[in-house]
Structure formats: C-alpha cells, structure tokens
Amino acid sequence: MADLTWRPAPHSRLTAAGPSRSPKWRLLPSATVLALVALAVVVVPLVVDLNEQYVDLAVANRAPSAEHLFGTDELGRDVLLRCVYALRVSLTVGVVAAVISAVVGTAVGALAGSVGGWFDRVLMRLVDAVASVPHLLLGIVIVAVLRPSLTAVVISIALTHWLTAARIVRSEVLSLRTRPFIDAAIVGGASRAQVLVRHLLPNVAPQILLATTLMVPHAVWHETALSFLGLGLPPHAASIGNMINDAQRSLLTGGWWMSLAPGLLLIVTTLAVSGVSGVWRDRLNPKRRTELTW
C-alpha cells in the first residue's frame, strides 16, 4: 500500500519573523547607520567652527537648502548643526544612564538570585513595586525633587530602567545555581561571594551587556521626553526634546523642517541601536528564534 503521509519539504524553511536571513545582512544596515551617526557626532564639532548657538536673524526660518540642509530655526540657527550636538547629548545621557541602570540591576538581581529565600522575595517585590509606576511619571518626580539638570535626568533614567536588568540577572543566576560546576565550587570550599564573583557573574556578563545595549534607546527617548516637558536641559541648550518643543510654534507658520529633522534623526538612531541589539540577542539566544517547517 502506498504511503500517502504528507511530509514537509526539506528545502523550504520559514522563521517566525519571515524568511531566514544571514545575521551579517541583518546587522549591516543598523551598523552602518550607527557608524555614520558616531562619525557625525565626533567629527562635525571638530570641523565646523560655527557654534550651534550662533544666531543670525537674517536667515531665520529658512527652508532646507544647499546652504542649510535641514533649514534654520526662528533665530537663524542651523538645524542640522543643532541636531548633531543634540544627538551627542542624547546618546551620552542614554549610554551613561544605561550603564548605571545595568550596574544597579545587576547588583539587585545577583543578590536576589544567589541569596534566595525571603531576601529574594523582598527584592522582587521591590522590583514589582517600582515597575507598577509609569517610568515617565516616576522620572518627572525624581527630576522635580533634584531640580532640572543633566545630572538629574541621568539619575532619573538610571533609577527607572534597572528593573529589566535585575530580572534578567536573577533568572540567569537561579538557572546557573543548579549547574554541577557551582556544586563543585561549593564543595571545594568557595564562599557565596566567591561563587558569585568568580562563577555566576562571568557567565551572566553577555546577558548584562545585551540588557545595557537594549536600555540605550529607552534612555534616549526618556531624556527626549523630559527635555520636551521642560524638565531636562536648559531651554537654550541643544537637545532633541528642546528642539521638538521649540518647533511646535513653527508648525503653525509652515516650519515643518524644524520638528522633522530632530524627530527623524531620533527615530533612525534608536532603530539602529535596536537593530544591532536584536542581532546580538538572537546570537546569544538562538532557541528564541522559533523556526516553522512547512
């Protein structure tokens, strides 16, 4: 009797996100954008003698042209130059805040996972309590208490974005605690602190670095939101949030480029960071890329 059982074709494979693609080609566009942004942020301030605060009322409210690629604002300041300086500030704040958040989250997650018991439950309830409050609302309260400044913005972002790192580290530590090499270290006389520093944290380091990278876009958007609300950098400073806030008045008079340029740069940069992080995440956790065979 003929076998009529249907079998999947061995050459046709689809992933849950679509056709399988090489990680190199997925990484190339995002890495290229990040390289161009980094080059502009570092090189433009060194090459261009013009200050981003330079006012020239004679060319105020000029649309994009060959002389001013992104146009000028209501004070005649070059929008492209201000975008470069603003992006440098936003990325600096995002990276610094993400690193601080990762340090705090790693400390909380490592202690909760390695100690366990009631200590773990108390720390996790603390994480749940902080997570129940919207990040932006909590950030506004922190900045209001510390008074608006660049330092206050960094602290507010760091104190509201450590939760993800804490959960990731705790989960990984709890998983590693059951491994035979941890039992061997304990039998060999290693203390709890030695096990944590020598064995657990080095094995969790890739996940910590990934969590830090993934936090950078969130931190950049958080800084932009605070500056837009007037709680970030001073109003005259070059900041993406300040530029978008200032551009609201110009939209009524047809100055669309004043908000389009900083908004577009912000979106493209954060998507590029997320793209690089996504490729890295898939390499660290290949099992999460579920494949469907047809």
Image: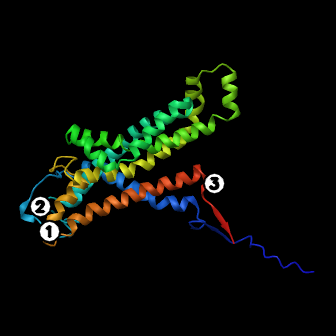
User: Which residue lies under the disc numbered 1?
Assistant: 62
Distance in Å between CA atoms under marks 1 and 3:
52 Å
Give the vertical position of 70 relative to 81 (above or below): below
The answer to whether the residue labelled 1 contacts the one labelled 2, judged by CB atoms less than 8 Å apart, is yes
Do the CB atoms of the residues marked 1 and 3 lie less than 8 Å apart? no
| Relative image position of residue 211 (x, y in whole percent) | 47, 45
Task: Classify mark 1: residues with Cα within 10 Å, few (<14), some (14-19) or many (20+).
Answer: many
Answer with mark 1 or mark 3, whichever residue precedes in sequence.
Answer: 1
Identify the residue position indicated by label 3 in the image: 287
Determine whether, in the image, residue 130 is placed left or right of residue 143. right
Instruction: Tell me if residue 43 can be seen.
Output: no
The quarter holding residue 246 reads: bottom left
Q: Is residue 90 left or right of residue 167?
A: left
Across and down, in percent, residue 87 comes to: 29, 52
Left or right of residue 22: residue 133:
left
Label 2 crowd bin: few (<14), some (14–19), many (20+), radius 10 Å: some
Q: Looking at the picture, does residue 42 appear above or below residue 173?
A: below
SS of the residue under disc 2: loop
Q: Residue at x 48, y 52 (%)?
A: 277
Q: Which of these two is toward me, 262 or 24?
A: 262
**C-alpha gap between disc 3 and disc 2:** 53 Å
Q: Dot 3: what SS?
A: helix
Asked if the residue at tag 2 contacts the one at tag 3, i.e. Cβ–Cβ closer than 8 Å, the answer is no
Relative to 235, is 105 above or below?
Answer: above
Tag 1's secondary structure?
A: loop
Residue pointed to by mark 2 = 76
| Foreground of the two, 89 or 175 | 175
> What is the quadrant of the N terminus in the image?
bottom right
Residue at 35% across, 61% down:
267
Instruction: Identify which amino acid the numbered label 3 is placed on.
Output: Lys
